[in-house]
Structure formats: structure tokens, C-alpha cells
Image (cartoon, rainbow, N blue to C red):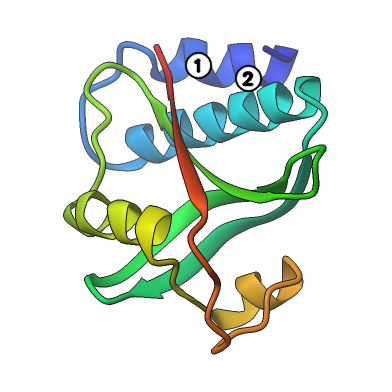
Amino acid sequence: MTILQNRIFAEVAYAPRGGVVPVLKGQVGVEQSIAAAERRGETVLGREITIETTAGRTRIDLLIRMPESKLRFIESKKGRSAQLTRNQRVAFPKIRGEGGIPRGQQAAEAGLEPGQPLGPTEVLIERWD
């Protein structure tokens, strides 16, 4: 972890649940996922990408391009109590099996075409304690 990540984590590691604490922990987890992706030779294309599936919409932390040019989504969870949202639990299997439709500015900035279907895409869930 970077010095900033260590400082943020030290401040929030034992704080009460709710409020800004889970958000800050989540940010640290996303930074850890970015560092891990870069170590694997992957390129981060975008953050907070909204995907619509037949099961509903969900937002995924990262979109990356793997070295072999395939796309992959990464959802980062920081801490033992961090869970997928209901929408993530139902949408991730759909994205893996059917794909989905990118929505919004974040998707466009990541190089996706909002409104244009995306084929089945891997969703990696990375857990950081």
C-alpha cells in the first residue's frame, strides 16, 4: 500500500460502521485493486462503470484491459464485512454469461459505447482485508 492508503486505512480500520468510513475503506480497496491490476500487466480503462443487464443496473469499480486485449471488470471489496449489493449479486452472473449494456459518461470515458451491448465479460471480485 502507498503511504496515503496506509494513513487512510489506519484512520478507518476501527471506526464505527456506516457513514463515510465504508466509502473511505472502499477507496483504499479500489486503489489496491488498481495496483494489483498494474502488477499483472493490465491497463485501467475506467472507474465506476454502470452496466445494465436483464437483471437490472449495477455499478462496477473498474474496467481493465488484460494483456491479451480482453476486457474485465473488477469489483473491489475492502474489509471482512464488505458485501456485494443486491444489484451486484444478481447482475454479475448476467454480465459474465450474457453481457450487458454500458450506460453513462463513465462508460464513454472508459472507451465503451453507451447503449451498445457488450458481450459476456469477466467480473473479478477482489477482497482486501
Residue at image mark 1: 9
Q: Residue at x 69, y 47 (%)?
A: 64
Alpha-carbon neighbours of circle 1 within 10 Å: few (<14), some, or many (≥20)? Answer: many
Considering only vertical position in the picture, is 100 above or below 13? below
Alpha-carbon neighbours of circle 2 within 10 Å: few (<14), some, or many (≥20)? Answer: some
Please state which amino acid type lies under the numbered disc 1: Phe
Q: CA distance from mark 1 to mark 2?
A: 6 Å
Q: Are marks 1 and 2 in contact (CB under 8 Å)?
A: yes
Answer with the quarter of the image where residue 84 lies.
Answer: top left
Q: Residue furthest bottom?
A: 115
Answer with the quarter of the image where residue 25 lies.
Answer: top left
Considering only vertical position in the picture, is 94 above or below 126? below
Q: Residue at x 74, y 40 (%)?
A: 66
Is residue 60 found left or right of 109 in the rendered image? Answer: left
Is residue 2 found left or right of 14 in the rendered image? Answer: right
Can you say which quadrant of the picture contains the N terminus? top right
Considering only vertical position in the picture, is 55 above or below 71? below
Q: Secondary structure at mark 2?
A: helix
Considering only vertical position in the picture, is 82 above or below 19? above
Can you say which quadrant of the picture contains the C terminus? top left
Question: At which x and y percent is residue 41?
Answer: 82, 28
Please state which amino acid type lies under the numbered disc 2: Gln
Q: Secondary structure at mark 1?
A: helix
Residue at image mark 2: 5
Q: Residue at x 53, y 81 (%)?
A: 117
